[in-house]
Image (spheres, rainbow, N blue to C red):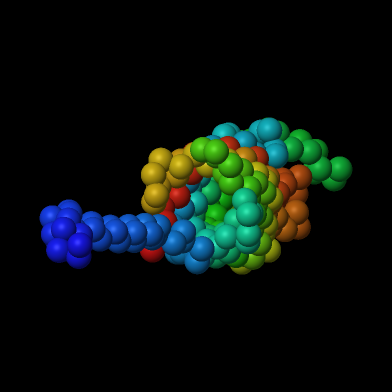
Amino acid sequence: MWVPLLLAIAAADPATPPEPAPAAVQEAPAKTGGAFGLGLDAGLDLPVDDARFPMASTRVELVWRAPLGGPLVVNLGLRSGYSYAAGESAVSDAALGVDAHALLMAHRIPLRGLARFGLRGEGLEAGLQASGGADVVLLEARSFGRSASSNALTAAMSAGAYALVPMGDALSLGLVGEWDSALVDIAARTPGLSGDLSAMRIALLASFLFG
């Protein structure tokens, strides 16, 4: 009776071994560290003194960019660039009268620290920014037959907002709007003429990330 049973077991198909479970696909970890960034902007300065002309300006910034958790991101770094102010206008003085052709020309090179705090969303990053430090000012002014020529280092700052649209992993393009303030005291040398070089800046910003 055992022979038919053994023959039946031998004729049966061998058990198919179970297939190994597929290995879990490991996703690349999201980048959570910081990265160096380079920012270049080209803008237009609208001076606080309406007798002066709107002028082009530029800024260059080197920053360390780091996430703060969730959608928050911060950029901290250094900023420089170039601004120019010029204009001819009528000024008055209580003792000297009126000078219809007072002139001022000023070159500014910012040397500042920069902080930018933003929120990242779907296809957009926007937030607030500020810079502070000093500006190198090369200035020439003239009023009432008196002239002033000055190479000065003056306190300066800016505050405003920005918005960036990512164009890929390394490049973002956007806009900056900020109030940029700098003041040189020239009242004693050129009466009636203001040394306020402040302006409203509207600029296009290109931001590059490395690493």
Q: Nearer the viewer, residue 79 or 207?
A: 207
Residue 152 in picture, x, y percent from top left: 60, 65
Q: Is residue 83 visible?
A: yes
Residue drawn at point x = 60 percent, y = 56 percent? 73
Residue drawn at point x = 63 percent, y = 61 percent? 68
Q: Residue furthest right?
A: 94
Q: Nearer the viewer, residue 196 or 1?
A: 1
Quadrant for the C terminus in the image: bottom left
Tell how many labels. Answer: 0
Q: Nearer the viewer, residue 1 or 93?
A: 1
Q: Is residue 43 above or below residue 169?
A: above
Q: Is residue 18 above or below residue 173?
A: below
Residue 177 in picture, x, y percent from top left: 62, 40
Q: Is residue 62 visible?
A: no
User: In the shown orientation, is residue 33 left or right of residue 171?
Assistant: right
User: In the shown orientation, is residue 173 left or right of residue 16?
Assistant: right
Q: Residue furthest front?
A: 1
Residue drawn at point x = 59 percent, y = 46 percent? 120
Residue 32 in picture, x, y percent from top left: 51, 63
Residue drawn at point x = 53 percent, y = 49 percent? 83
Residue 76 in picture, x, y percent from top left: 58, 64
Q: Nearer the viewer, residue 146 or 49?
A: 49
Quadrant for the N terminus in the image: bottom left
User: In the shown orientation, is residue 18 left or right of residue 167?
Assistant: left
User: In the shown orientation, is residue 68 left or right of residue 175?
Assistant: right
